[in-house]
Amino acid sequence: MTIPGRELTGTIKFAMQATKDLKLSDSVSHQSEVEKLGAELGHEVSKILTSKKNKDLFEALTLFWKQNGLGDIAITQADTLLVRLSDCYDCKGSGDGGQPAPCAFKRSLLESVFRDSLGADTIIEELECCKSGGTACLFRLRLS
Ligand SMILES: [Zn+2]
């Protein structure tokens, strides 16, 4: 299986780096911009992950994330979907971090990917974050 979209990955990494460099004091004014960017890139990611079936989508997203050096991703499905991002490209070495909390970029990107790919409205929230002492960025998705 080949994963295209090297340029897309570069853009995602650039965005992650950029959001990391933003000052926390500016986070409110930057938040909506960061979310728009995350959503845009999420649309692009979902175009690459062409499969419409849940299992295949999860597998494709996991491969895309890992193979492009964005970090580790684990997706579990019960009543809700749990997406666990660890060793994140944008959280590594960030300490207290400068990224608008909590991970607005990744949240918007994931929301966009799942909304496009599953054709469902998605509400996503971050339950735990690397930047606030968590071991991973843990997102919960509710599909309606
Ligand atoms: Zn986070």
Image (cartoon, helix red, strand yellow):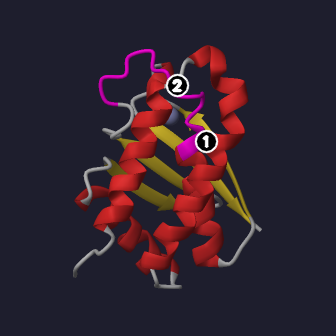
Q: Which residues are magenta?
A: 92-105
- Is 98 included in the stretch rendered in magenta? yes
Residue type at tag 2? Leu
The reply to whether callout 1 and callout 2 are in contact (CB within 8 Å) is: yes
Q: In this rendering, would 21 be left or right of 30?
A: left
Residue 42 image offset from top left, x and y in percent? 54, 62
The label number, if any, that marks residue 34 in the structure image: 1
Residue type at tag 1? Val
Q: Quadrant of the N terminus?
A: bottom left
Looking at the rendered structure, the secondary structure element under dot 2 is: loop
Q: Which badge, 1 or 2, comes first in the chain's sequence? A: 2
- Residue at image position (66%, 32%) is 30
Q: In this rendering, would 100 be left or right of 122?
A: left
Residue 96 image offset from top left, x and y in percent? 45, 15
**How much space separates mark 1 and mark 2, taking CA atoms?**
10 Å
Q: Is mark 2 within 8 Å of ligand 1?
A: no
- Residue at image position (54%, 53%) is 82
Q: Inspect this view and state whether residue 78 appears.
A: no
